[in-house]
Image: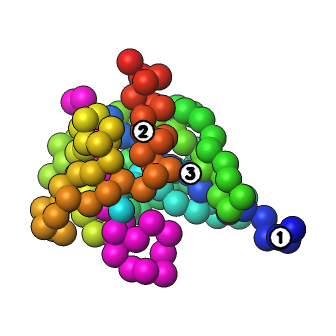
């Protein structure tokens, strides 16, 4: 049995006009899900609530300020506790400044279902991270 506690992260689902803003993670082999599409967000800092963490992480990663994130659910495995929130993206994608990750994009439900989305910067179809794809499929089904 491992004596390492799972890390806690807070992630944001950001719907925009029937699509969802997602991050193409850096293609660095030492990070989780390198070169895969995932959700914006990240590690909670000591003493931080998941709500505060998701707001801080999204602001740090794309310069987008949102308030009152709604809890969607929690996805846990042996390594990670993922607190999932959603809030509408209320600005055009060209108003965002990507400071973490390889690319960002508005991903359609069909692309999420297929598990791949094109990245202009990568110049290729890139896969969605499996856990992120499952979260998004669950959200789309719940969202209606």
Cβ atoms at labels 3 and 2 below 8 Å apart: no
Q: Mark 1 Cα within 10 Å, few/some/many (few <14, many 20+)?
A: few
Quarter-of-image position of residue 75: top right
Cβ atoms at labels 2 and 1 below 8 Å apart: no
- The residue labelled by disc 3 is 10
- The residue labelled by disc 2 is 136
Q: Which residues are magenta?
A: 17-35
Q: Quadrant of the C terminus?
A: top left
> Element under label 2?
helix
User: Is residue 18 part of the magenta span, yes or no?
Assistant: yes
Q: Mark 2 Cα within 10 Å, few/some/many (few <14, many 20+)?
A: many
Q: Quadrant of the N terminus?
A: bottom right
- The answer to which of 21 and 132 lies nearer the viewer is 132
> Element under label 3?
strand
Identify the residue at image location x=26%, y=60%: 126
Identify the residue at image location x=60%, y=50%: 82
User: Is residue 142 part of the magenta span, yes or no?
Assistant: no
Cβ atoms at labels 1 and 3 below 8 Å apart: no
Question: In this rendering, does residue 69 appear at all?
Answer: no
> Element under label 1?
loop
**Vertically, is 112 above or below 36?**
above
């Amino acid at each position: 049995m491992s004596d390492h506690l799972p890390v806690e992260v807070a992630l944001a689902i950001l719907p925009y006009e029937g699509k969802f803003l997602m991050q193409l993670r850096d293609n660095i082999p030492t990070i989780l899900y390198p070169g895969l599409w995932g959700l914006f967000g990240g590690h909670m800092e000591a003493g931080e609530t998941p709500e505060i963490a998701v707001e801080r992480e999204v602001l740090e990663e794309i310069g987008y300020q949102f308030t009152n994130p709604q809890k969607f659910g929690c996805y846990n495995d042996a390594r990670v506790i993922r607190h999932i929130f959603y809030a509408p993206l209320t600005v055009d994608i060209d108003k965002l400044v990507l400071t973490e990750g390889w690319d960002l994009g508005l991903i359609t439900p069909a692309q999420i279902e297929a598990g791949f989305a094109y990245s202009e910067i990568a110049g290729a179809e890139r896969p969605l991270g499996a856990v992120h794809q499952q979260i998004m499929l669950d959200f789309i089904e719940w969202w209606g």
